[in-house]
Each structure stands twice: as structure tokens, then as C-alpha cells.
Image: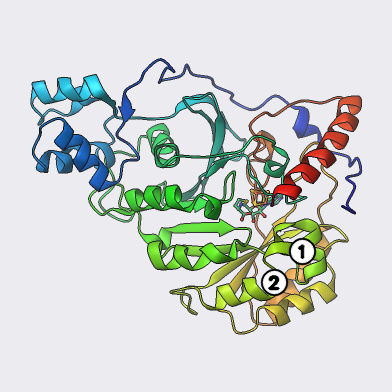
Amino acid sequence: MSVRPALAPYPIWAYLPAMNEMTSPASVTAADTRTALVGLSRAALQEAVAALDEKPFRAKQLWHWIYHRGARDFAAMTDLSKPFRARLEEHHIVGRPAVAREQTSVDGTRKWLMQYDDGQKAETVFIPEEDRGAVCVSSQVGCTLTCRFCHTGTQRLVRNLTPFEIVGQFMTARDSYGEWPTPTDERRMLSNIVLMGMGEPLYNFDNVATAMKIVMADDGIALGKRRITLSTSGVVPEIHRAGAELGVNLAISLHAPDDDTRSTLMPINKKYPLKELMAACRDYPGASNARRITFEYVMLKDINDTPAHARALIKLVRNIPCKFNLIPFNPWPGTPYECSDADTVVAFADQLAEAGFTAPIRTPRGRDILAACGQLKTDSEKLSAKELRAREAALAETWAEKEAAV
Ligand code: SAH
Ligand code: SF4
């Protein structure tokens, strides 16, 4: 592998204690063997109810309590008989991931560190706007891929999150803002979901799909498919399914207009090169001028940010209904890259805009708590220069190992 990470200067906030750090005890203990109802598909919930000798309509009532009212314990479900509640209590929990840490950034961005029953952790971020906001949800602990600019990619340990662990992230965020019962009009603070947290959602499609079908159901959380965006590094064979089975918005982490640059930044490009990726985008069900695919493009100094790159990009996406999201690179301790200069980013955006594309420059959010794009990782550390050099060597090794497995 040609890229050797060089020690880059990293900003002071990487070493600062997090703002408003809060810790809370785990809400579910490892010794509790009862199963969570959150995350069961509707059919699986019906089966759980049948196993307790109850009629099917009880499943509908439970669904309403769990996903419309946000009830966290059975005692609150007052229209269920006491014996039924007792049996539920014996065999199940409603279910929330334990929150190991909650932090709020100076800009209002909030991040939760979820701790699951096996001790594994994943992060969830809420990015508030004035009267709405997106919850950025993780789909895996870590990521099997090794995009060079991404902090999550340096994490060795990886496992898929279950539907409970995925839906539970969104529900925990709503608990934190008290947004229950589900608002019946369109006005809600937690108005969108972006599958842009840790992990590659298309490597965990079945669990992601079960979770998204739960949040989309009209008689529960009722978040429309247009309010959900799935971001992928480009797992070509699974892209069509996301459109056909879920109908959610598609975002592609593009980051380079040619195979050489993209393969260096994102090794998955060697498996699914740009020609195949662009064909999958052209075929994406439901994509139209009214519903464009988003190409995410992280701005990396001297790597992918020249006028020639912009020209190549414009040519590459011809005939695809799309827009761009230019993301200033968010640094993390030990990263080999730097963010492009502000003037370069603006010139790049202007070039795309002149060619007729929407190409906003995304304002980084939550950098002070390492909550911005690509900064999520579940064993945040503060490192000395010596430790950073050791990290540099370990990083190169991790990348080599994981790449061999792609
Ligand atoms: N695995 C999926 C979704 C998670 S990453 C994917 O790659 O699409 C969410 C977005 O953040 C992706 O576009 C990713 O490329 C981008 N990203 C990763 N590291 C980043 C960094 N350090 N700075 C800015 N954006 C980054
Ligand atoms: Fe994984 Fe996405 Fe990060 Fe790449 S950018 S390592 S696919 S999380």
C-alpha cells in the first residue's frame, strides 16, 4: 500500500475534555436474559404475543405503546391486563441501549455513546437545525472498510448492529429530547435519519432494513422514507435493494472522480470501480430530478480538490439526477490528511454550481466532541506524540490487515 500516514498537526480540541459530559449507569444488565421487543418486526412481535397466549390485536396495542407513545416499561401500558403485563415483564423488556455517555457540543450537536449487552459500543449523533434535525445512526460497531480519511475505519473490532440496536439509537435520541408521543403533524425536532454513523449500512442490509421498516411504520414512529438517507461507500450489488425495498434517499461517498485517486482513498473502489458505481446510481429506483442522489465529497488538501478534479467530477456524473455535499475534512488524532483551504473549497463549489449542480459546503458540526462526519470511533483516546507515532504504525498495520479481507 502506497499511502503512509504522516504525522499531521491536529487541533487542540482533540485533547480538550468534552463539553457537558454526562454518564449514566447501564439500563440493561448483562445478566438480564429477557428479550427486547424494540427491533422486532411486526410479524415477530405478533409471534412473541402469540407465544404468551394473547390475541393478535395485543401486538397492535404493544406497537402503539412502544413506537407511538415511547413507553419504556410495561407498567405504563394501562390498557393491557395486569396478568399480561406480568407475563411480558417476565419474558421481555421494552428495550433501550444503555447510554454510557452523553455529550453536547457548544453548537448544540449531541452525541451518545451506546453500550450494548456484550459491552460493544457505537455512537449516535443528533444535529439540530432551527426547528428540525437529523439523527445520525450507526449500523455497525466499527467498519470493515478502511477509507483512509475516516476515523471509524481505523477501528479493528467490527460487528453488525441488530435491529434493536439500530432502532434503539433513534428512540434513545427521542427520549433525550422528550419527543413522545410521536408528533402527529410534520413538525418535529428529530425529523430525519441519516445512516451516516459508524459502519457500512449495506454490509448489514437485513438488519438496517428491518430497523428502517419499523421507524417508517405509520402507526408508530412514522418517519417517511423521504426523511431517511442511507449513505454507502459504494457496495454496488446492494444499492438497488435499498431503493427497491426501502425507497430511502441514497447518498454515495464519492470523494474522487477517477479510479486511481478513489482506490487510494477508499480501497472498496478496487472491488466496485466507478463505472459500476455510476451504473448503479443511474439504475437507483426512484431517483429523479425531484429526488436526487447525493454525492458526498470530502475536501482533502492537494488530493482531490483541484479544478481538474472538479471538471472530471462533472463529466463523471453526467445523466445522473444528483447533487453534491462538499464536506470539509474533519481531522482526527493521527490522520494523514488535511482539509483543503477555505478558498479552494469555495472555488470547487463555484465550479460545480456553474455547471448547474447544487453543491453546498457542509458546516462541520460537533467537532469539539468528535461528533462530526468521520470522527466517530468508540475508544477515543488522548495521545502523546510518542503514542501518536506508535498509533501511526498500528494504523498502517490495521489498514493492511483489513484490506486483505475486503
Ligand atoms: N459507511 C458509510 C456511512 C458512514 S460515513 C459511508 O462511507 O458512506 C459518513 C460520511 O462521512 C461519508 O460520506 C464519509 O465518507 C464521510 N467521512 C468519513 N470520514 C470523514 C472525515 N474525516 N471528514 C469528513 N467526512 C468524513
Ligand atoms: Fe467505513 Fe464509511 Fe468510514 Fe469508509 S467512510 S471506513 S465505509 S464508515
> Can the viewer see residue 234 in this picture?
yes
Viewer-proximal residue among 110 and 233: 233
State which quadrant residue 144 falls in.
Answer: top right
State which quadrant residue 313 falls in.
Answer: bottom right
Crowd rating for badge 1 (residues with CA inside 10 Å; few <14, some 14–19, many 20+) = many
Q: Label 1 amino acid? A: Arg
Q: Are marks 2 and 1 in contact (CB under 8 Å)?
A: yes
**In x, y percent, where is residue 24?**
49, 18
To which residue does mark 1 refer?
Answer: 262
Viewer-proximal residue among 373 and 104: 373
Q: Label 2 amino acid? A: Leu
Whichever of callouts 2 and 1 sits on the residue coming sooner in the sequence is: 1
Q: Is residue 206 left or right of residue 218?
A: right
Q: Is residue 96 left or right of residue 370?
A: left
Q: Is residue 329 left or right of residue 189?
A: right
The answer to whether 339 is drawn above or below residue 96 in the figure is: below
Please give the label number shown on residue 274. Answer: 2
Query: Image point 44% across, 62% down: which residue?
Result: 248
Query: Image point 70% across, 44% down: which residue?
Result: 153
Give how far apart the Cα atoms at labels 2 and 1 are: 8 Å
| Circle 1 SS class | helix
